[in-house]
Amino acid sequence: MSELHALYTLWLREIKRFLRDRVRVVVSFIQPLLWLVVFAAGFGARLVIPGIDYQQYLFPGIIGQTLLFTAMFMGISVIWDKEFGFMKEVLVSPVSRFTIFIGKMLGDSTAALIQGLIVFAFGFILGIPFNPLTLIAALPVMLLITIGLVSVGLIIASFMGSLENFGAVQTFINLPIFFLSGSLFPISGVGTPEWLQIAARFNPLTYGVDALRTVILGSVWVPLNPLYINIGVLCLFDVAMIGVGTWAFSRMK
Amino acid sequence: MPPAIEALRLTKAYGSFKAVDSLDITVEKGEIFGLLGPNGAGKTTTVSMLCTILKPTSGTAIVNGFDIVRQANQVRKSIGIVFQDPSIDDRLTGRENLSMHANLYGVPVSEQRDRIARILKLVELEDRADDMLRTYSGGMRRRLELGRGLLHYPTVLFLDEPTVGLDPQTRDHIWKYIKELKEAHDITVVLTTHYMDEADRLSDRIAIMDHGKVVVLDTPATLKGTLEGDVITVQANNPEALSELVTKWLDFSKTRLYDGVLEITVPNGKTAMPRIMEIATHNNIYIESILSREPDLEDVFLHYTGRSIREDSTKELHGLAAIHRRAIR
C-alpha cells in the first residue's frame, strides 16, 4: 500500500514538473508541425507511396518520432536529480528501487503521451482523416511505444554523469532509431538496401510505427507485420527494459 | 535501555585506503552525538553507512535495533537524514516537497495534512509553504530539509554538516532549531561537522575522528578539561626562533605554528606570559601581540592528532566545495 503511495507521488512529481515547464510545452508544438507541414509538402512531392497521401503516411511516423524524442529527453530528469541532489532523498527512502523506477517511468511516459496527443490534435487540424475511435485504439499502442523508450532514456541517464554527455548520447541514439523505423520512408520493398531492412528489424520503433499505421490508417495501409506481432514485440521490449531499468536504478548511489 | 546506535568494527575501504577503520561507537538514546574532524576524516562515510547509503566493507552497525546490512529497509524507515548537500526539488513548493516525503515514507494519508502543517510551523515556513523552493534562501531551504527529516517521526536524525555554506546568523538560527527539534520530538541526533563551535554548542558527546578512526570520545567539557592549562597565542616577527627558544629554555614543549602565529600550551597562562616576553626581548624578537586563553576543541583536536583542523579546512572554499560535492554519482 505504501509502495503505491510512493508510486503515485513519484508519478505526480514528474507530471507537475513537466506541466510547469511552459517553454518546453510550447516549443514541443513546433517540431511536429514543421515535419507535418513543411517536410511533408516537399518530401511528399517526390516520394510516392501507393494508395496513401504522404502526409497521411508520415502522420503516425511523427507521432512515433515525438514519443521517441520526448521519451529520450525525459531521461534528463534523472541526471538533473542526481546533479541537484533530489535523487538522494528518493534513493535513501524505504521505497523499493523497482517502485522508484516505475514511478519515474510512468510519470515521464505520461508526459510523452501528452506530447503525442498534441500531434494527434495537429493531425485533426490538418485534415488527416481518422475517426474518433482511432484515437482510443492508438493510445494503448502509443503507451507501449513510450514505456520502452522512456525506460531506455532513464537507463542511459542513470549511467551518465553530466547533462552535456547525455545530450550527445541522445542525438546518437535518437536519429538512428528515428531514421531506421520507417517513420519517414518505407523500409521495405524493391530497391531498399538489405542492410537497412535488417537494421530496421532490430528497431523497436519499427514495430511501434507499423502498429500505429495499422490502427490509424486502417485498410489503406499494408502492414509489415500483423498487429499482434507488433504488439507482442513492443510488450517484450517494454518488459525487458523495465527489468534493465530496475537493475540500473538499484546500482545507482 | 538499548543504545540508539552501536557500530561494530564498522569499516569502509576503497582499495587499500580505509576511509573508516574498524569503528566502534555507541550512541545513547536521546543524546546529540557529534562526529568532529577535518574534511576526509571519514565522518560522512560513517554516516552514509549508518544510513544504509553505503555498504560497509566489513563490520556492521545496529541502528534502532536493526542491522544496517541485513535490515536496511527497517533502518531507513526509522531514521531521518539531512544531507550535507541540498536534496530538495526546487521546482516544487515547500508543501509539495514535504508531501512527497510523507508519501515516500508511508506516512498515513489521514495524518499528512496535520503533520505537514505542524512541521511548517516548527521551521517557520508557513507563509512560504506554497512558493516554489527556487525562491527560498539558503537558510530557508535548510530549515525545510530539517523539518522534512522529522516528518516521518524518525527516532534517530542524522545531520551531515548542517550549516556548511550558511552565514553566521543563519547558522545560529539552525543550531537553535536543532536543539528545539530534538527536545520537541525526543529523538537522538547524530551530527557531523568540521566546525568546532558547532560541535561544542550542540553535542552532548563528541567523537573526534581522524583518518577513519575515533581518536577520542567524551563530553565537550571533559575534552577541554583534559588539556590542563592555557593556550598562549603569540604574534612575533620571528615566531620560528621564539618557538625554539621557549621549548629549549622554558620547557614548553607543546608549541605550534600556523599562519605565522605561534601557539604555546602552558600550565598557567598568567605566569607564562611574562617569561615568554622576557626571553623574546633578550633575543631581539619583537612581539606584536600576546594572548592567553582557555583551550577550545581546536586545541583538543591538535592535542590528540598533532594536526590542526584549521589546516585542512580553512584553505578550502566551503561554498564552492559544497557545490562540487552536490553531484552524486
Image (cartoon, coloured by chain):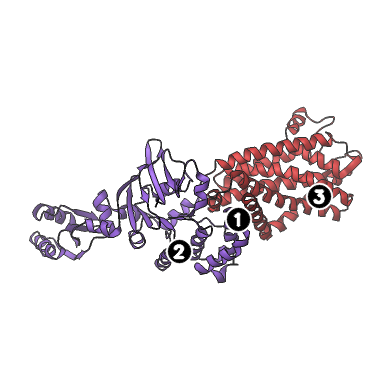
Chain colours: A red, B purple
Q: CA distance from mark 1 to mark 2?
A: 22 Å
Residue A236 image offset from top left, x and y in percent: 72, 35
B121 sits left or right of A67 in the view = left
Q: Amino acid at mark 3?
A: Leu
Nearest to viewer (mark 1 / mark 3)? 1
**Residue at image mark 2:** B181
Q: Residue at x 75, y 55 (%)?
A: A29
Residue A59 image offset from top left, x and y in percent: 82, 47
Q: What chain does mark 1 sit on?
A: B
Q: Nearer the viewer, residue B232 or A23?
A: B232
- Residue A190, above or below A87: above
Residue A1 in sight here = yes
Q: Nearer the viewer, residue B277 or A253?
A: A253
Check contact, mark 3 vs mark 2: CB within 8 A.
no
A167 sits left or right of B86 in the view = right
Check contact, mark 1 vs mark 3: CB within 8 A.
no
Q: CA distance from mark 3 to mark 2?
A: 59 Å
Residue A11 image offset from top left, x and y in percent: 66, 52
Respond whether the residues carrying marks 3 and 2 are from the same subunit: no
**Residue at image mark 1:** B103
Q: Amino acid at mark 2?
A: Leu
Q: What chain does mark 3 sit on?
A: A
Few, some or many residues within 10 Å of mark 1 (<14, 14–19, 20+): many
Q: Amino acid at mark 1?
A: Asn
